[in-house]
Image (tube, rainbow, N blue to C red):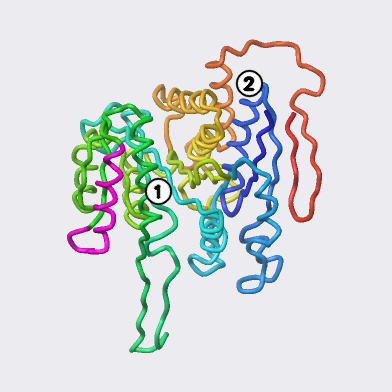
Amino acid sequence: MTLKIGVLGGDGIGPEVAREALKVLDTICELRSFSTERIEWPYGADHCMATGGPGKGVVLPATIWNEIKELDAIFLGAIGDPRFEAGYLEFGIVGALRFTLDLYVNLRPIKLYSEDLCPLKGKGVKDLDLLVVRENTEDAYAGIMGHLKKNTPDEVAIQEMIYTRKGVERVIRYAYQKCMERKKNFKLSLVDKANAIRAHDIWRRTFAEVGREFPKVQQDAMYVDACTMWLVKNPESFDTVVTTNLFGDIITDLGAMLQGGLGIAAGGNIHPGKVSMFEPIHGSAPKYKGQNKANPLAAINAMGMLLDHVGRQEEAALVEKAVAGLLSTRRIPSLQAGAMPCDRIGDLVAAEIRTLDGDKPRKPKPAAGKRTLIAVGGRKKTARR
């Protein structure tokens, strides 16, 4: 098997954490005897500045869409830079990938690996293990917006929430399917605000209708304010959650803090059966750029999600087990930036994977671990053998 992935390191700490995730992938490839082909794209703040800057420079070139057609998945480091208006790069790169590829599921596991990482009193590993399925292409993020009389005292700013039956139904059906696959409590919670946002009635009706196809799954509907309360008070009551784009964006960051912080949380932008994108959910943290201080565990977990998506479930489980083992035994004692060098954490995860896989020292084979680097346009193509 040859896994073809596009790598977009992006901005700030993005290239550094992506490097460690790729280090882990290289280890998996070596142990499990499969190969990767990679396109490493340079797109992000520096590339945009070098090609003309905001409003003129290249954010994503049109040629990238043909390259993506040949891939199995995309790995993203981080996007964002203070030289640009907030949202300029994020919408131009992450948003463009989500909408153009129709990545309608944002999948966010919220799982605690070590009790000392959780800020909740009396909650342990068994209490925090849920999966959030966030709709990823509609709601207020669809881009239906505008300003009237901008920069005057009479300015009006409007941004429309939009929900389609197709968009709501497909993400709800996906959530029911994931709930069945998890085989935890067979409980799916819909999170909305149907009492105040009356358009959310489409979520309630669709949730009930699709649920008839999954009689084994218990249906649970709650308002988003109640959801945030219960996530803090009784996180163990959750199994799988499905929610809107806006609410999912918010509650998954709350969930990330409950599991230890942004340094551990990963996400997938998914269209089932098609090229999908995986990323750590943290930002680009430009103040740590180039200092080898960033914690790459979220990126490494995202690589595990990528492996799961492309059908390498055993390898994905191996990555998660390695991360969990290092945190639970405090060999990685903290998720804070600078607590341990970024590359050192990557080395520890790679070594732990070797240990878990029962890897024994052996005589190196000729050309093992070699890479062929071919410059192609503005990016680099890498073959891992």
**Looking at the picture, how far across and down is residue 370, in whole percent?**
77, 29
**Looking at the picture, how far across and down is residue 81, in whole percent?**
55, 61
Q: Amino acid at mark 2?
A: Arg
Q: Earlier in the sequence, mark 1 or mark 2?
A: 2
Is residue 267 something one can see in this rendering?
A: yes
Query: Does residue 202 belong to the magenta stretch?
Result: yes
| Mark 1 vs mark 2: in front | 1
Q: Nearer the viewer, residue 378 or 19?
A: 378
Q: Is residue 85 left or right of residue 57?
A: left
User: Which structural element holds mark 1?
Assistant: helix
Residue named by callout 1: 170
Is residue 285 something one can see in this rendering?
A: no
Residue at image point 56% right, 44% down: 274
Q: Is residue 242 left or right of residue 237?
A: right
Is 337 rendered above or below residue 54?
above
Image quadrant where residue 126 sits: top left
Q: Amino acid at mark 1?
A: Arg
**Taken as a whole, is the magenta stretch helix, strand or loop?**
helix
User: Which structural element holds mark 2?
Assistant: helix
Q: Is the residue marked by circle 1 packed among few (<14), some (14-19), or many (20+) residues within 10 Å?
A: some
Residue named by callout 2: 32
Q: Quadrant of the N terminus?
A: top right
**Looking at the picture, how far across and down is residue 74, in whole percent?**
59, 45
Q: Which range of residues does the magenta coloring cover?
A: 194-213
Q: Is residue 129 left or right of residue 265?
A: left
- Mark 1 touching mark 2, by CB under 8 A? no
Is 169 rendered above or below residue 335?
below
Q: Quadrant of the C terminus?
A: top right
Residue at image point 66% right, 48% down: 69
**Looking at the picture, how far across and down is residue 141, in whole percent?**
42, 63
Q: Is residue 95 left or right of residue 381?
A: left
Residue at image point 34% right, 54% down: 244
